[in-house]
Amino acid sequence: MKLDKEEVVQRRVDLMAAEGITFKTKVNIGQDSEWTAEKLRKDFDAIVLCCGATLGRDLVTEGRDAKGIYLAMEFLTANTSYQLDHHFDGTIPALNAKGKDVVVIGGGDTGTDCVGTSLRHGCKSVIQLEIMPMPPMERAANNPWPEWPKVYKMDYGQEEAAALQGADPRQYLVNTKRFLKDEVGNLTGLEICNIEWVNDNGRFSPKEVEGSARVIPAQLVLLAMGFMGPEQEVVKQFELETDARSNVKADHGKFTTNLPGVFAAGDMRRGQSLVVWAINEGRGAARECDKYLMGVTNLP
């Protein structure tokens, strides 16, 4: 998302192509008859699956069928693809936030990217709803160094929104009750409410704060509530074993699946994570794949 595509990404792709790697783009394994799992296993001695974990968590509630509600990755992927195709000429894609009241549901890096992209499109306003409480300003006693500090901070998207709108766009401890739409099905707003987390026999669950229900306007909602694992078509095609979170079952350090010669690495194996883990797992899977093919390996 954030790397320069022409100067950084394309340079790396060109280097790998010069080393002999063949890239086949716009291929859907299992959906394109030419690229079935059966054919891949027949034609290749080893396969490494690094398909990511892009299956987004949906929000199934009243009015979900309104026109104007999208999973975050639909919105972000469409924007990036458009910018690449149009060489960043300053125009915006058909799926855009221009002139709209935008509501981003969820936080994390994906939510931040939705906020930043909406601002670049020229949205009318942007609000980010989070069901969790606002993090503390300082470390809690149970979050000592060297653990990652779980404290309040603003990423680039919130900083830009605050500069334009005057405040952090995030609202904490908020739940969406239903989506509102007009007579032709277009999204017009959300009914939301404040919640509190209550202990229900050792398990915390959200409870609506009485009298807090209200309606906010929105013509575009972006769902950034996390990911449910990898797209399932490839998993089903290869008949791969999965763990409790629907990720491909393959031990770190080995990366081997239940199929001989088929390896899995990255988000597809460990769940949604950071690019540094993608790099680490890519190197590890390459080493194990080399060892499988050659019997020994000199890769680190």
Image (spheres, rainbow, N blue to C red):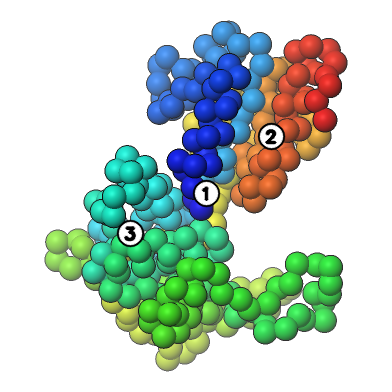
| Residue identifier under label 1 | 3
Q: Quadrant of residue 277?
A: top right
Task: Reply above or below: 16 against 118.
Answer: above
- In the image, what residue type sits under mark 3? Ile
Q: Position of residue 91 (x, y in %)?
A: 26, 53
- In the image, what residue type sits under mark 1? Leu
Task: Reply above or below: 155 against 10.
Answer: below
Return the disc, 1 or 3, that comes first in the chain's sequence.
Answer: 1
The structure residue drawn at horizontal position 49% and vertical position 75%, both measured from the top left corner, is: 159
Q: Position of residue 165 (x, y in %)?
A: 38, 82
The structure residue drawn at horizontal position 14% and vertical position 61%, both measured from the top left corner, is: 184
The mark tally for this picture is 3
The structure residue drawn at horizontal position 61% and vertical position 76%, both measured from the top left corner, is: 153
The structure residue drawn at horizontal position 23% and vertical position 69%, both measured from the top left corner, is: 99
Task: Reply above or below: 167 against 277.
Answer: below
Mark 2: few/some/many CA within 10 Å (<14, 14-19, 20+) = some
| Residue identifier under label 3 | 69
Task: Reply above or below: 21 against 69.
Answer: above
Return the disc, 1 or 2, that comes first in the chain's sequence.
Answer: 1
- In the image, what residue type sits under mark 2? Gly
| Residue identifier under label 2 | 282
- Extreme bottom residue here? 211
